[in-house]
Amino acid sequence: IERADGVQVVFEVELARALAARRTGLMGRQVLPARHGMLFDFARLGTVTMWMKDTPLPLDMLFLDESGRVLWLYADAAPGSLTLISAPMPARYLLEINGGEARGLGIAVGD
C-alpha cells in the first residue's frame, strides 16, 4: 500500500479468490503475524459485506477499488461479532489485517 506521503507499506497476503476461501477467510486463526493478511478478490465492483463469525482476532478491513485504492476502512472489527460490515460504496477487493495495524502504519482512505 502506498500512503499519501509516498511511503510503501508491504504486506504478505493470502489470496481468497474462490467462493469457499472467501467464505472461510481468517475464521479460526489464532495468530496473524504483523504485516500479514488476507486479500479477497470479488472479481468486480459491488457490495461487499463481511462479519467476524468464528474469527478470534480483531481485524482492520480495508475496502479497495479496482485500482487498489483504499475506499473505506473499518478498524478493529470485534472478534466473533455477527454484525455485518459493509463499505458505503462498491468495492472490488478487501484486505484484512490485524486490528489497529492500519492506524499504526499510517494507512488511510485514499492510499
Image (spheres, helix red, strand yellow):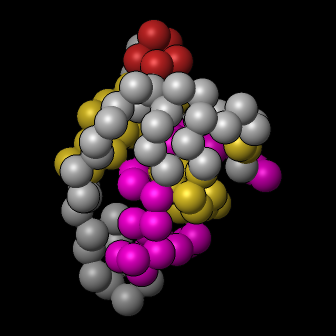
**x and y, in percent, of residue 80 in the image:** 59, 35
Q: Determine whether 52 is above or below 17 in the image.
A: below
Q: Magenta stretch: residue 101 in it?
A: yes
Q: Nearer the viewer, residue 57 or 108?
A: 57
Judge from the rendering whether residue 99 lies leftward or rightward of residue 2; answer left or right.
Answer: right
In this rendering, does residue 50 appear at all? no
Res 4 → quadrant: bottom left
Q: Which residue is pictured at 46% across the width and 66% down the height?
A: 100
Q: How many marks?
A: 0
Looking at the image, is 107 positioned above or below residue 12?
below
Where is residue 26 shown, x and y percent of the image? 41, 31
The residue located at (45%, 10%) in the rendering is 20
Q: Quadrant of the N terminus?
A: bottom left
13 or 84, nearer to the observer: 84
Visible residue check, residue 19: yes
Q: Splitting the image into 4 quarters, where does residue 44 fall?
A: top right
Q: Position of residue 31 (x, y in %)?
A: 28, 42
Horizontal side of 43 relative to 3 (left or right) equals right
User: x, y percentage for residue 13?
Assistant: 26, 42
Q: Determine if the magenta segment contains residue 60.
A: no
Left or right of 4, for residue 83: right
Q: Is residue 74 positioned above or below 24 on the image?
A: below
**Height in image: 75 above or below 61?**
below
- Range shown magenta: 88-111
Nearest the viewer among 64 and 37 is 37
Residue, far bottom: 5
Q: Residue at x 41, y 17 (%)?
A: 21
